[in-house]
Amino acid sequence: MDKVLTCSFRKAGSYYSMPDLHSHSSECELYFLSTGERRYFIQDRVLTVRAKGFVYIKAGLLHRTSSLGGGSHTRYYANVPLDWISELAGILPPFFVVQNLDEAELMFAHLLAEADNIDELSETRCRALVSEILVCAYRAYRNAETKSDDFLDIITAYIRSNLKGDLSLGRLAGEMQLSPTYFSALFHRRSGMRVSDFIRLTRLNAACDCLRAGAGVREAAEAAGFSDPGYFKDVFRKVMKISPSAWKKAHR
């Protein structure tokens, strides 16, 4: 195929995760969880994906996955060239999760088979399957009666709005009128990560937005709530595996 499509099927253990925050500069991610349960961190949201659930992530968005335990999982995964879905770009949100999309499993199986057995018609067939998956998934997402997690919605919105303020455990627990110990345990159980990790990743995401918009490293650090630019550089490099200035150069 002229355009590169990456498609795979994998069975992994209960604690397999993609711990590093990452993005795909020119490919969109399509993910279908056949069995098991997973947690996605996308931009600054925490989302649960259950068996027969589907995830769409637009190119350029920072994300990572983590395990909820309780057994292994199996999933289909595809990185799709951005220009393959140009006609849908104005309709689809930057990312979304839809549950109980059983019909997508067969479409992913066909996509994988087509990608593994390439001939002169494979790209046309793969493009059609990708469009079919996305249309089916977005219609289901749009029509779903979503049940939000009030605790996570409230506290993650508060964190996003106060990156330059007091985000101590005591302060956050007080906002929810909970003890720090119970708040910490509840956040971990609901989100699949520690509250300190969520804050760090949310700040890095905000910093990346600033860098992408042309801000300097010091300015991005301040906007994301890092009081010490040197510490910001250390954290950024540890998580992103690249310096802030190099990331800015690569993503402008």
Image (cartoon, rainbow, N blue to C red):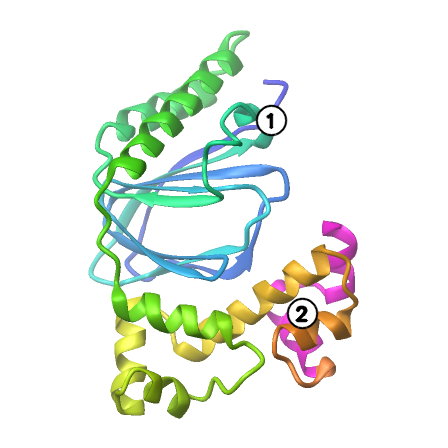
State whether residue 148 is above or below residue 109.
Answer: below
Residue 24 location, quadrant: top right
Q: In this view, does 105 lie to the left or right of 248?
A: left
Say which mark, if any, is on residue 237: 2
Residue 195 screen position, x and y as percent: 40, 77
Q: Residue 96 versus residue 104: which sits nearer the camera?
A: 96
Residue 118 screen position, x and y as percent: 50, 15
Whole-Å distance between the Cαs marked 1 and 2?
A: 30 Å
- Find numbered disc 2 in the image and state the secondary structure of the residue it sits on: helix
Residue 84 location, quadrant: top right
- Region rendered in magenta: 231-252
Q: Looking at the image, which residue is at 53% across and 31% down? A: 89
Q: What residue type is labelled 2?
A: Arg
Q: Which amino acid does label 1 sit on?
A: Asp
Say which mark, if any, is on residue 34: none
- Find numbered disc 1 in the image and state the secondary structure of the residue it sits on: helix
Residue 244 location, quadrant: bottom right
**Quadrant containing the N terminus in the rendered view:** top right
Q: Is residue 9 left or right of residue 222?
A: left
State whether residue 180 is above or below residue 248.
Answer: below
Say which mark, if any, is on residue 83: 1
Disc 2 crowd, CA 10 A, few/some/many (<14, 14-19, 20+) = some
Q: Looking at the image, which residue is at 57% across and 63% down? A: 205
Q: Nearer the viewer, mark 1 or mark 2?
A: 1
Q: Which of marks 1 and 2 is nearer the N terminus?
A: 1
Q: Residue 239 versus residue 180: which sits nearer the camera?
A: 180
Disc 1 crowd, CA 10 A, few/some/many (<14, 14-19, 20+) = few
